[in-house]
Image (cartoon, rainbow, N blue to C red):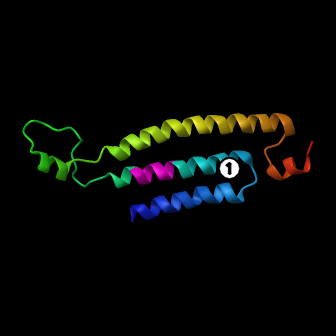
């Protein structure tokens, strides 16, 4: 069920990117899509009643493998957050430059003001 909620969140972001004409709303749609993918990756590595991926001396390797949470999706999400922050900063600077040039955030107005 929770995977469907991630997909619905992704669709909300996709709607914002495809159907909105405001540059700021498009950036927010991309941001929502990014975080829905991050949430999905975290949920892939989740185990109910899981233990942190730190092995103790008393634990057997097979027992540890059965109970431990997968750390790879967590590492991927941390990397994705850093990359997403850089992309978001770039998109915001482009939006600011577009506003300085055209005086609006509306894409349809920018198409009319060629030059």
Picture residue at 61% right of the left edge, 39% below the top: 88
Residue 28 x, y percent position in the rendering: 63, 47
Q: Is residue 115 above or below residue 18?
A: above
Outermost left residue: 58
Exactly how many numbered labels are in the figure? 1
Quadrant where the C terminus is found in the figure: top right
Asked if residue 80 lies left or right of residue 15, the reply is left
Picture residue at 42% right of the left edge, 61% below the top: 3
Badge 1 density bin: few <14, some 14–19, many ≥20, Cα 10 Å: many
- Asked if the stretch drawn in magenta spans residue 62, the answer is no
Q: Which corner quadrant of the image does residue 12 belong to?
A: bottom right
Of residue 46 and residue 65, the one placed in the foreground of this image is 65
Q: Is residue 72 above or below residue 101?
A: below
Q: Which corner quadrant of the image does residue 47 belong to?
A: bottom left
Asked if residue 34 lies left or right of residue 97, the reply is left
- Asked if the stretch drawn in magenta spans residue 38, the answer is yes
Asked if residue 19 lies left or right of residue 88, the reply is right
Residue 8 x, y percent position in the rendering: 52, 62
Instruction: Give the main secondary structure, helix, strand or loop, of the magenta stretch.
Output: helix
Q: Which residues are magenta?
A: 35-41
Residue 23 x, y percent position in the rendering: 73, 46
Residue 72 x, y percent position in the rendering: 34, 44
Picture residue at 39% right of the left edge, 65% below the top: 1
- Residue at numbered disc 1: 26
SS category of the residue bearing label 1: helix
């Amino acid at each position: 069920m929770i995977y469907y909620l991630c997909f619905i969140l992704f669709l909300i972001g996709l709607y914002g990117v495809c159907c909105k004409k405001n540059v700021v709303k498009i950036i927010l749609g991309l941001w929502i899509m990014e975080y829905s993918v991050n949430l999905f990756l975290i949920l892939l590595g989740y185990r109910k009643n899981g233990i942190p991926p730190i092995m103790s001396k008393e634990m057997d390797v097979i027992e540890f493998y059965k109970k431990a949470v997968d750390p790879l999706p967590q590492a991927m999400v941390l990397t994705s957050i850093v990359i997403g922050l850089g992309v978001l900063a770039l998109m915001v600077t482009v939006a600011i430059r577009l506003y300085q040039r055209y005086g609006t955030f509306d894409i349809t107005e920018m198409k009319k003001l060629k030059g």
